[in-house]
Image: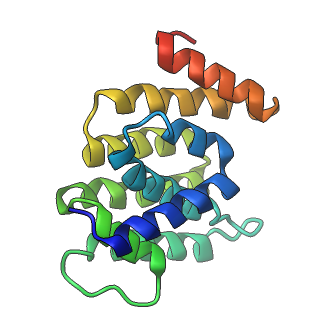
Amino acid sequence: MVNDKTASSGDAMLDQLRAEAPARYFATLFLPAPLRSQISVLHMYDLRLLSVQAAGDEVHPALIKLAWWRDAIAGLGHQAVRGEPLLGAIQDRIPADALQDWAALADAHMDRVEHGDADAVVAARERAAAATLGHGRLLRSMTALRIADRMKGRSLLRRQLAMTWHIITGRN
């Protein structure tokens, strides 16, 4: 059961997602309402990891930050959360058995920073989403998000129409 604190912070997370990543927010709207809070936390976590970039040729500071996130996620079941609201949201909403896949997402971002492997991030994000919510409707929502990512240069309305078309028909 979701308490009032979790519900209101879930709304805040959706509002933040809407402001920072409209395409991800739009894809989230196709999920059943009870699942939106969990997937919005995943998107915010992924966006936080995406914000970690190497400064020129120096990748070590970025790798250290990503390793901190990986270790913090892996330790959520064993220690109290302090100082990072996103970790608190993850601990409140995400099943403990899915946290290993969430830590693997940080590992994939480490590969992105070190080797430029963006495909590993997409696959790890989808595994984390599947571990959190199960497959079913999630698959079309995540595929719609990939379609929106491919159409980055186009208008938000055009990306939303393409995602809607895919979710309804299953076709690109």
- Left or right relative to 39: residue 136: left
Decide if residue 128 is on the left or right side of residue 78. Answer: right
Q: Please tell me which residue is depicted at 17% across the width and 57% down the height of the picture.
A: 97
Quarter the C terminus occupies = top right
Establish if 172 lies above or below 73: above
Residue 114 point in image, percent of width and height: 58, 57
- Quarter of the view holding residue 6: bottom left
The quadrant of the rendering that contains the N terminus is bottom left
Residue occupying the point 61% across, 77% down: 61
Residue 75 found in image quarter = bottom left
Frontmost residue, 108 versus 166: 166
Query: Compared to 63, does 11 lie above or below?
Result: above
Q: Which colour scheme appears in the figure?
A: rainbow
The image position of residue 112, as x and y in percent, is: 57, 52
Residue 166 position in % (x across, y down) = 54, 17
Q: Residue 73 versus residue 169: which sits nearer the camera? A: 169
118 left or right of 97 in image: right
Comparing 147 with 26, the one in front is: 26
Which quadrant of the structure image shows residue 145?
top right
Residue 74, image x and y in percent? Answer: 28, 70
